[in-house]
Image (tube, rainbow, N blue to C red):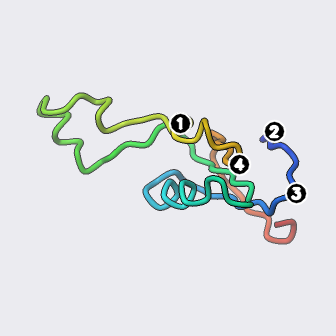
Amino acid sequence: MAARIPESDFPRIIIIGAGFGGLKLARNLIGKPYQVVLIDRHNFHQFQPLFYQVATAGLAPSAISFPIRKLFHKAPNVHVRVAEVDHINHERK
């Protein structure tokens, strides 16, 4: 399946996983001279430490879960792809 990532003259940085670290790095690279590809198997991020608050009706589920694409829709150099990485070809980078 093709990822359909546009060609760019900028160096490409691929971030696998939109956890806390992946999101922080991608947000820090917004507007920088890099093409950033953020890959995650889901189109949402969940703040898991507050699951108990949702389970006890202290918070709405939307308070701890948000769409990843919405975070980066105004960032032209960040491309979000919903996919699962099963192989990394080190020779072809």
At label 2, the amino acid type is Arg
Tell me the SS state at disc 4: loop
Q: Residue at x 80, y 43 (%)?
A: 5
> Could you tell me residue 17's position as x and y percent?
55, 54
> Could you tell me residue 80's position as x and y percent?
64, 42
> Residue 93 — which label?
none
At label 3, the amino acid type is Asp
At label 4, the amino acid type is Asn
> Could you tell me residue 41's position as x and y percent?
56, 43
Q: Crowding near pointer 3: few (<14 within 10 Å), some, many (20+)?
A: few
Q: Residue at x 66, y 54 (%)?
A: 31
* Earlier-in-chain disc, 4 versus 2: 2
Marks 3 and 4, how far apart at CA: 11 Å
Marks 2 and 1, how far apart at CA: 17 Å
According to the image, label 3 marks what residue? 9
According to the image, label 1 marks what residue? 43
According to the image, label 4 marks what residue? 77
> Could you tell me residue 51's position as x and y percent?
23, 42
- Whether residue 40 sits left or right of residue 48 in the image: it is right
According to the image, label 2 marks what residue? 4
Q: Crowding near pointer 4: few (<14 within 10 Å), some, many (20+)?
A: many
Labelled pair 3, 1 in contact (Cβ < 8 Å) = no
Tell me the SS state at disc 2: loop
Q: Residue at x 31, y 38 (%)?
A: 64
